[in-house]
Image (cartoon, rainbow, N blue to C red):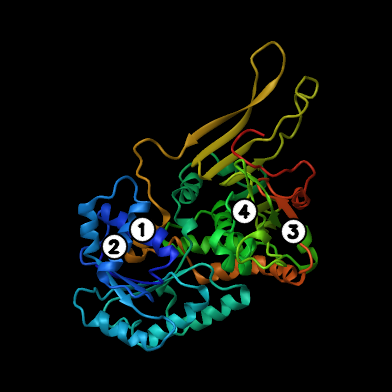
Amino acid sequence: MCQPCTYVIFGATGNLSRVKLMPALYHLEVAGKLPEGSRILALGRRDWDREHSIHEIRGWVKDKVRGELDEEIFQRFSQRLDYFRGDLTTREMYPRLQTYLSDNARFADNIAFYMAISPAEFGMVVENLHTAGLLSEDHGWKRVVIEKPFGYDLESAQALQRRIGRYLREDQVYRIDHYLGKGTVQNVLVFRFANTLLEPLWNRNYIDHIQITHSETIGVGSRAHFYDSAGAMRDMIQSHLLQLLTLIAMEPPVSLEAESLRDEKVKVLKSIRPIPPSAVHAHAFRAQYSEGMIEGERVAGYLQEANVPPESVTETYAAIKVNIDNWRWRGVPFYLRTGKRMAQGQSLVSICFHHPPQQLFRNTQVEQMKQNWVLLGIQPCECLRVEMTVKEPGLEMRTRQTSLDASLRTSGDTLTDAYEELLLDVIDGDRSLFLRYDEVEYAWRVVDPVLRVWSMERDYIQTYPAGTWGPEESHRLFDKEAHHWRHSLNPE
């Protein structure tokens, strides 16, 4: 068991704390993973005291708990909880916080500051923590957890790094991407490097192209203020999907130690061919959902959502084609796409293999063999599927598609949320599932040329009806006429 830690959560009364952080910390309590003596200090502007905050947190946990809320365990969990009222935008709050933490022996000297706050406030909070002496490691370690997005574009990411770099070492910064905490995403590493079956085929000689899709049926909901300034490219592709691409494309690391793993991921990002401004429209596509039908109900278009400006051209659908110029992947296009209000909600990696080198069956009723696919379902179906062609029973030469299916879950498996593992990794000092700054910077370098061109095109944006798979025009990204978007795990 690691040393006790104090988790100070900035923005503890907000949505992230309510939906993810407090339920995840409770589940760590259930699992017996929180070190003895660890405490959680919720920091917020609301006029609460400790008793009221515990009452609120109990409701949050009850809404999200797996199964029934165990009153005995929650009572034990509540002993770890404290509340500190303060406005993080005022400098005077930080010396008060420093005094509160140092004068109470129940708080461990090891402190993790979790920034569940607006990205615009990251730099200011870190600077004020330093000024108040809260980042001093004279007694215990100090770590800062920063939620995505890290910057708004390449320039702002570099500026934020310079600012926090004055007060924090790189090993103190935990840039969290909860997508990497998903068990199935981590299973990509196991699938690739714990099995020798596919490794000889995992290259340009056998793979035709790779698609990575994250689609959602939901709209922007209450996130309109944030989303309209970000858009799908920043919200999903720059972070989650490019990270998933690095796991699919990386070389075997020397070990699963954090730096070895992240070194290989950065190599992939560095190898992505830059997209010049003149080629943006050949490599990227954006669109915005209009009104349509979702599960039999009519839903509003993006421009009709609350708090969305009526002239907005923010993309709710984004697709990009990237090329990795290294020995393994030269000539294999990677297609990444994400969208809201689409026909189905899922995350899927689709790997398409080349056609056989000759058509042995051209003089039979089999006109053309279908390509083999390896499909990795991330959510909601966590599975691995290998599609193959087999002969149909009977006297004639006819074929059909079949698949080898492996569910990544079995009955009795313990379900965990991504935040549970990531919160525990911060305490353990394990940074392998967190982003190093150069990963963030090179990911911004991939999408920044696209964002710059889109920012100048403010007059028009393509639309697609809610409940569909997005605009047909996005097919222009494909290198070959026969390529198409793979929408699901089902045979197509």
Question: Contact (CB < 8 A) between labels 1 and 3?
Answer: no
Circle on res. 340: 4
- Name the mark nearer the viewer: 3 or 4: 4
Circle on res. 283: 3
- Name the mark nearer the viewer: 1 or 3: 1
User: Residue at horizontal 52%, vertical 33%?
Assistant: 405
Q: Along the polypeptide, which appears first: circle 4 or circle 2?
A: 2
Under circle 3, the secondary element is helix
- Name the mark nearer the viewer: 4 or 2: 2
Quick check: can you spot residue 278?
yes
Residue 174 on image: x %, y %: 43, 69
Under circle 4, the secondary element is loop
Amino acid type of the residue that numbered disc 2 sits on in the rendered structure: His
Q: Along the polypeptide, which appears first: circle 4 or circle 1?
A: 1
Report, in whole angstroms, how far the alpha carbon at label 4 lies from the one at label 2: 35 Å
Q: Local crowd at mark 1 within 10 Å, few (<14), some, or many (≥20)?
A: some
